[in-house]
Image: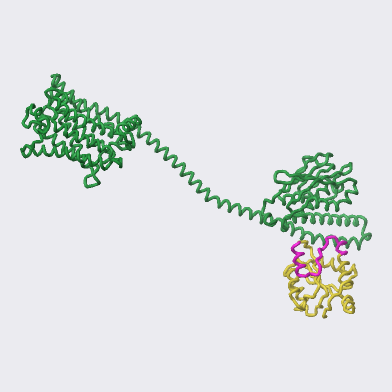
Chain colours: A green, B yellow
Amino acid sequence: MTGFLRAWVDKISGMKLPVQDTVMLRCRLFSLFTAIATIMIGFLVLIGWALDLIVLKSVLSGMSPMKPNTAVCFVLLGSALYLLQFHDLAAQGMRQKRSAQIAAGLAAVVGLATLAEYVLAVDLGIDRLLFHHAVAEYPGIYPGRMAPVSALEFVILGASLLLMDAPAQRAPRLFQYLALTGTVLGLIALLGYAYGIPELYKVFPYSSVALSTAVLFTLFGLGILLARPDFGLMTTATSEHLGSVMARRILPLALILPFIIGWFRLQGERAGLYGTEFGLALFAACNVVIFTLLIWWTARSMNRVDEARNLINEQLLKTNAILERESVQRRRAEQALPEAHEQLQLRIRELARSNMDLQQFAYVASHDLQTPLRSINGFLQLLSDNYRGKLDAQADEWIDRTIASTQRMQQLIRDLLEYSRVDSRVRPFEKVDCAAVFDETMELLAPSVREIGGQATRGDLPTVLGDRSLLSQLLQNLISNAIKYHGSEPLRVHVSAEKSGGKWLFSVRDNGIGIEPKQHDRIFQIFRRLHTEQAYPGTGIGLAICQRIVHFHGGAIWVKSQLQAGSTFYFTIPERITSGRLEAVA
Amino acid sequence: MTRKSRNSLHPEILLVEDNENDVLLTREGFKRAKVPARLHHVENGEKCMAFLRRSGSYADAPMPDIVLLDLNMPVMDGREVLEQIVADPELNRLPVVVLTTSEGEQDILRMYRLRCSSYIVKPVDFADFMRVIHGLNDYWFSTVVLPETPR
């Protein structure tokens, strides 16, 4: 609908009206139609005078005709209003405004002159300038002279148009008050015609106001008001607000309904259906009912609008609350982040310290354990040397057993020391050629391998970043185990490596006695042994140290094995160093 | 030659050791190894320095030809003793053999930086300890020439 109207307006005006919304557009369309209608009616009346057509002059025979002057003034006013429609188009603005003001000014001057004739009782000769013969045919005191109210109307409406769009001054709304006055004056005459009360359009100031004149005045006043729907008084009725919506709904009906009801009441009274009192009561009752319904209907739709608005408000509030909560949470999280980081750092420091303490403990304890052990061993040796054979055989055996135990304990302490020393090293990592390490290790172990019969081989081994002596110890421990726990067949041990997702995966495969799967995790624990000291001597430190060395390098170690089916030990060494060790390497 | 024979005839050894058992075992070991030396003993670093400087009750103490120094001791430990000996122009010609339980890399490095003469880790097994004593005897009292000691 709006699109159609706008397109239509564009078409007839040949310009684009900068109209914001439907209400504004409708108002301005009404104003535009009023302007065009006023011009056309003015011309039609003039044609009527020229060709003596009653229907054009006074609509119905016997009714007052519109005076030629009035018609000319209407053409002038209509033209002015038409020209003022396009005020917001800068290009044409000034020239058109000037023309509009000249037209409006002329109409006002004619009105003023006519009023002067009435007041000063002079004849300025303007009444019979046009069609003076035809005018003379109509009876009246001043043939051809427009009614005083019409003259006043032209002054008022002309002034209104002149003041429209005047630069901000003391009374920017004055043109609207003038237009309103014009409408009311026209309405009074119109009521007279509608209700058949000649007093209202024939009393002196209204003498011979034509019906069409009354209609045009009423409409024209509105036309002026609606030409500027976004200004002054009009904003109350045209804005987006709820009050304006209500005004738009009720105002037209409030203007028209009493008018119509009154007309019906009058018709009924005149037809003798009821008396004045009853008619008045009926009029009041009808008004009450209709306005109650009107207000009820309006209120209901207002409530709906309000509800929708509340709903939206509520949702907005909710959304706002959610956003606020989120923002609070985010802020809290942001505040918590450094705190958590600090906590983490603290924990890391604590752990590092605890780890240091543990190393220190193991180291010191081992040392301090060695001192009394040395004394026990020393004195037992002296006892054994000095008194062997002087005590009985039992005493000699016990002394030997005690010495053996101190030696075992010494071994345990030495292993514990070695274990605790793995990551107390401060040497930076270096590039270690694992093939060379293997070859060196095998030089050490070759006699043992030869002794049991067998061979140790290797595939291509990489160069990795690490601690050379630790990696050497790792290989040595693993291969020593393979030698130590060999099976009945000749020993085969093979060391190989392959790249696997950023790590080197090493494997040490043997054909030895194997390990039960349920023991696979336990063998890496310190001093954990699966065999008796008699079957396989040792303290059970080797694999624990291996695991510590691998962990120290950031890798993992595990075994795959079945009893009597050989074992494969796997361990990984990262290609790159992930921890702070990298700085040491650099 | 005369200096060597004079010194090696009755070498004076100062053992700085806080553990009584170790002292007893060391004495026993020296006796068994028939080391022709006189073994003096003090139980901490402070007394060691007093002995060397002949202060207090050590006014008549002989100047040792060699010091056997333990590291971990109460009052003043062996590290400090070596520092003071090295810093003292009267004493810095003294051979100091560190004889300790500590195998710490840091300790070994530090004592050699202070120019200790040898660093020996005390073996736990007495038989091993005897080998150390024999070695000390052979080396310090038959092989090397020691500086002349003012008595």
Task: For the N terminus of chain A, give its image quadrant.
Answer: top left
- Where residue A94 appears, as percent x and y from the top left, is 26, 43
The part of the chain drawn in magenta is: B105-131
Q: Nearer the viewer, residue A82 or A325?
A: A82
Of all residues shown, which one is farthest toward the right? Answer: A389
Q: Is residue A124 magenta?
A: no
- Where residue B64 appears, as percent x and y from the top left, is 82, 75
Q: Quadrant of residue A155?
A: top left
Vertical placement of residue A204 versus A500, above or below: above
Q: Quadrant of residue A316?
A: top left
Q: Is residue B128 magenta?
A: yes
Number of labels in the image equals 0
Judged left or right of residue A40, residue A414 is right
Judged left or right of residue B22, residue A554 is left
- Where residue A391 appears, as percent x and y from the top left, is 92, 59
- Where residue A119 appears, as percent x and y from the top left, is 7, 39
Residue A130 shows in the view: yes
Residue A277 shows in the view: no
